[in-house]
Image (spheres, rainbow, N blue to C red):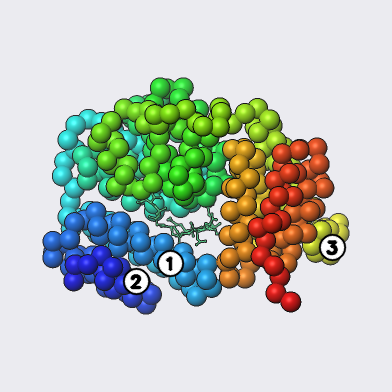
Amino acid sequence: MTSPDALRVAYLERVAVSDEAGAIAVAADALDAGVDPEVVLLDVVAAAQREVGERWAAGEWTVVQEHVATHISERVVAAVARHAPAPPPTGSDTVAVACLDGEWHGLPARLLAEVLTRHGWRVEFLGASVPAAQLATHVHRAGPDVVAISSSLASRLPAARRMVEACRATGTPVLAGGPAFGEDGRWARAVGADGWAPDARAAAAMLAADPEGPWFTEEPADGTPVDRAAREEQAVLHARRAELVRHAAAAVRPAVDGPGDGVPDELADDLGHLVDFLAAAVFVDDPSLFDGFVRWVGSVAIPTGLRLDEVGPVLDALAAALADSPRTAALLRGAHGGLPTPVA
Ligand code: B12
């Protein structure tokens, strides 16, 4: 079997029954049959992981099944590296691959690291959730030629800006990637990155064509990245996060606001997540980021702390509490349109 689609289906079948050895065998057999290791990594493992996400969001798979799948995929990535070792680096150019601070989706970054290794780069994989200050220290000490920052969650974009600034201080170019930066990479520009690529193949091709960057060739169409008002309103949201979570929770579940009563963990998580996406949208000054988040909340079938019928009242409560932050309040009011109509 060598077709990527058939391999993905076979791989997911093994993953679905927690069969780690079977999943590794699907990958190893494909390599033995002459399938390019990059195809196994990107068109089988990565594509399967995205499908796992869809199954989870549709309520078909539990969080535990997703965790098992991700564990197996990590083992398969390592098995591919053992079974079909990358050729030695072609030069001394080094890329450091790091996830944004607060970003725990490490596998996408790991896949990028594997692919770049196969394209002759020396790769330092710094892992998930790298704090900007730690990245700065590392870049000073190790002096990579390029820093690649990875993120799946747009809520982490303010951290991207801090990481870009840390690298800029050393003159190291930053390449950004992952769904957090938007389908066309527009938020990579907004946080000041030097380039963006949609996937690992495109990143390898871009770095081969120009290892030094900057890769963005035009100025952002809509002005300078992250203006002062955006930073200030984002900082307000960051500073008031805990209070806003309590305020929003009290608006939809009055019982949780009494002294000593805590907001249930799941509700607090979801509301914290909402405030973080709001802050990121304010930061890059793009309502479509928050609208996209609200649409996503409306589309996931999994039971969470925040019920769908509570989202509208939460947006209203936050808009009232944030009346002094005009961009934020406008974003909250505008996001109502993206909410699905409640089923009667
Ligand atoms: C596994 C997983 C997790 C695991 C991650 C473990 C790990 N070791 O990675 C855990 C359990 C930690 C997790 C947690 C959460 N997750 Co999650 N997760 C996933 C899942 C199912 C797979 C991730 C993955 O491996 N993807 C496969 C790869 C390869 O992704 P990729 O983006 O296509 O990668 C390519 C490109 O983006 C690019 N690329 C990536 N990085 C870079 C960097 C550079 C420089 C370049 C050039 C290119 C590049 O190259 C890659 C290869 O071609 C995704 C589903 C999905 N669609 O990805 C959800 C998903 C990303 N998670 C999601 C959510 C909501 C969460 C949580 C908030 C859930 C919760 N309520 O707690 C938390 C947040 C945790 C955090 N703060 O980071 C949502 C995000 C939705 C949104 N609107 O933002 C998704 C999309 C699920 C869904 N369908 O709704 N998750």
In the picture shown, does residue 39 fall above or below 125? below
Amino acid type indicated by mark 2: Leu
Q: Is residue 239 visible?
A: no
Give the Cα distance between marks 1 and 3: 36 Å
The mark lying in front, picked from 1 and 3, is: 1
Q: Earlier in the sequence, mark 2 or mark 3?
A: 2
Amino acid type indicated by mark 1: Val
Residue 291: where, in percent of width, then height? 62, 52
- In the picture as drawn, the residue positioned furthest to the left comes out as 33
In the picture shown, does residue 9 fall above or below 312? below
Residue 299: where, in percent of width, then height? 58, 65
Residue 302 left/right relative to 254: left
Q: Find residue 52 and name its label.
A: 1
Q: Element at badge 3?
A: helix
- In the picture as drawn, the residue positioned furthest to the front comes out as 221
In the picture shown, does residue 293 fall above or below 116? below
Residue 6: where, in percent of width, then height? 26, 71
Q: Element at badge 2?
A: helix
Choose between 186 and 243: the one closer to the eye.
186
Amino acid type indicated by mark 3: Pro
* Mark 1 sits near ligand 1, with its Cβ under 8 Å away: yes
Q: Element at badge 1?
A: helix
Q: Find residue 12 and name its label.
A: 2
Tell me the crowding category of disc 3: few under 14, some 14 to 19, or many 20 or more residues within 10 angstroms, Cα based: few
The residue at the point 50 percent across, 75 percent down is 60
Q: Earlier in the sequence, mark 1 or mark 3?
A: 1
Tell me the crowding category of disc 2: few under 14, some 14 to 19, or many 20 or more residues within 10 angstroms, Cα based: many
Choose between 303 and 43: the one closer to the eye.
43
Q: Which residue is mark 3?
A: 254
